[in-house]
Image (cartoon, rainbow, N blue to C red):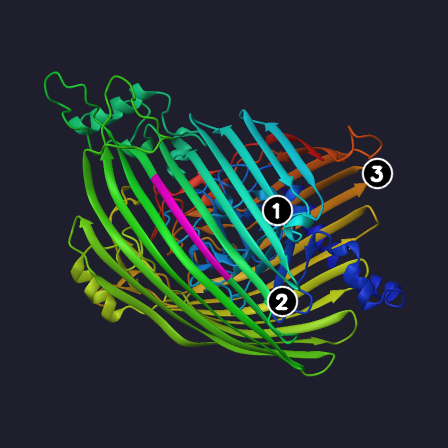
Amino acid sequence: MKKHLLLSAASIALVLAAAPAFAAETAATATPAEAATTEVDAVLVIGQGQSRQVQTLKDDAIALEAAGTSPLKAIDKLPGVTFQSADAFGAYEWSTRISIRGFNQNQLGFTLDGVPLGDMSYGNHNGLHISRAIAAENIGRVELAQGAGALGVASTSNLGGTLQFFSRAPSETFGAQTNVTAGSDSMYRVFGRIDTGAIASFGGLRAYASIADQKTDKWKGGGEQKQRQYDIKAVLPLGEGDLTAFYSRSERREQDYQDLSFEMIKRLGRNWDNTQPNWALAVAAAKAYQAGTALPAPFATVDDAYYAGAGIRDDNLYGATLNLPVTDKVKLNATAYGHTNEGQGLWYTPYVASPGYGTAGSTAAPLSIRTTEYDIDRKGLIGGLTIDLGAHEVTTGFWTEKNDFNQARRYYAETAAAPTRDPLDFQSNPFFTQWQYSFETKTTTGYLADAWTINDALKVNFGFKAIKVENSVKTVVGSPLAGTIESKDSFLPQVGFVYKATPDVEVFGGYTENMGAYVSAATAGPFGSQNQAAVNYIAKTLEPESSKTIEFGARYRNERFQGVAAVYHVAFDNRLLAASTAAPILGLPAVLSNVGSVETKGLELAGTYKLTDAWSVYGAYTYNDSTYQDDVINGAGAISVHTKDKTVVNTPKNIFKGEISFDQAGFFGKLGVAYTGERYYTYENIGGLAPSTTVADLTLGYRFGDDNAWTKGLEVQANITNLTDKDYISTIGSGGFAANDASGTAQTVLTAPPRQFFISVKKAF
């Protein structure tokens, strides 16, 4: 661990220290225009010309990860970011957690080609995860704004950072790409894509279609995780503009790892998991629970393990975008989109027996399958105008979306002798529907902004956006629930500046206000109580979460180096907390309340230095201090959770990222090291402290030459994740965050996968 931390720290020190010394050497030889096109920005661009802290990660960086890796894992190297997952690819959705400047995943904004992905929650209600929205091989770049993002971003959850994903453009020439990957735990992935090139007879229309198929066994326990994706994109030139159409389909099936506690890890080991394929043990535990007798070894509680759990998702994402210059001074852009989702999250529960269990001659099991079922149908329209007024560039636009969301809780029967259902199939014929609700969310946003170029060195931007979101609910089955809750703010300002002090140095700063809209779901948000009186009370008293972000920074860039330093302060007000009434896995309702504020302040440093034409180093350091400003007060006016001055959950104070890479004579490689400081999953910081970790990943590969048709476009790449086979806690809060956990019994952590190996063969035609 010390060696890895030293490597990370050394990389950062080298990157940041090298800039001033190297500047004198290159300033006389590199013009700003030349610096703008140098290879230093081939993989990472550090927000040049932006008034906000922004970084762009290109497809080259994503391609260096193991095939099938989520782009969320790829951007973990950027300052301010913390990412965890219980699988090697960062794609297992129950476990993926991303945090930026103290804001957790459901407080961030996500888009793909401008289309909103919602807050990417595991329990779908307003979008889908990026791992399902597009195959990683088709992502062209990822843009991270650690603050609240641009005014025109289609999100109502981006209190903190914003991640914008952009798909690759279809090629101008005909071609194809085939990638085959195999590795640890019987993993395989096959990806194929064909580009039509520009078709002159169809006005220069160009398009691509791709398919990706991946499957892997879980690294512990029984079961597998698999996904198939189809992506289509077409671009038709229209004079100086274009019309783009896209369609993506994802069929994802993944079996879960069991949530663990610190106590379970000590008692059962890090490799403990659900019992599959041992059906008899799961039945024996459920039978003992139903009878109130002693549990079979090694169970201490019936929640130690279930037979299995799984997440099943089918998604269709489609739309069209028009970019068109109306005049030489006015540009129009408009996107119409749609998204449908059908999903089930399930587990084999010992708490509810199958019908007939315990009666003479019955074959029913003492357990059943419990599902939470999702059905999303959302459609939206995004529009914008850009008007060039010389020194002023005025932009204005809107976003409107209607989201129909249906959510249900159902139970399905099983037999005692052997399982008759596949947990990776959609379940049908339930014996009981506990509840079912229909939600409608109407979102309308608008913005107006002006970028004023005062002179060649100074540019100022200012503007505001307005948000109105209406959430309504109707009961299909269950406790009667009806009503509408609105979150609204008509003036959320954003101002900023960027000043080019020298050809190589610029300073920037900005202030942004934002609001997080309520969500519509039976398991989260204002309707999570499933109680009409509680909803009525909430509608009158609850305030939506809001944030005020201030940041200042400086960027330096020359022919071989680019770097950034930024400081920030965030006031996060009207924090919402749901008071849970039972263990998270049971999914019982919670009552939402405003519980005070959070103050965050921090420092971000990042830089890339090209040592030679072949070798480069990258380093990033983040110091983040996020603390609760208030205790949680109950209805009687007493303190129920002592959070004042405590560290916010899942927010390490120190994060180091270091990377050394080379690319020469066909050979390429990358060694990445990440240090993440300790993290709490308890609001009171009593127990629940996950230790700091240092993890390394390695990439090695070779690109063959163009000497003949067989080797032209051929590439071989090997990836080793968790290079040193580090045993550590990856995800925290998988089962929710706890008030305190001195005994270490909260089942809300997941262990990281061991060292794993993957090899890919890629061929471009």
Q: Is residue 301 above or below residue 362?
A: below
Q: Is residue 62 magenta?
A: no
Near mark 2 (Cα within 10 A), the count class, few <14, some 14-19 or many ≥20, is: many
Q: Earlier in the sequence, mark 3 or mark 2?
A: 2
- Residue for point 80% across, 46% down: 615
The residue indicated by pointer 3 is 665
User: Alpha carbon of mark 2 to alpha carbon of mark 1: how far?
Assistant: 40 Å
Q: Residue 16: tell me if it is visible.
A: yes
The residue indicated by pointer 1 is 207
Task: Name the foreground residue: 527 vs 276.
Answer: 527
Which quarter of the picture shows residue 33? bottom right
Q: Secondary structure at mark 3?
A: loop
Q: Earlier in the sequence, mark 2 or mark 1?
A: 1
Residue 94 at x, y = what percent?
Answer: 42, 42
Q: Amino acid at mark 1?
A: Ala
Please provide the residue range marked out in magenta. Answer: 335-344
Which quarter of the picture shows residue 703? top right
- Overall secondary structure of the magenta stretch? strand
Q: Is residue 517 above or below residue 709?
A: below
Badge nearest the viewer, 3 or 1: 1
Task: Name the foreground residue: 728 vs 79.
Answer: 79
Task: Name the foreground residue: 749 vs 280.
Answer: 280
Mark 2 touching mark 1, by CB under 8 A? Answer: no
Q: Is residue 343 magenta?
A: yes
User: Alpha carbon of mark 3 to alpha carbon of mark 2: how far?
Assistant: 37 Å
Q: Residue furthest left?
A: 360
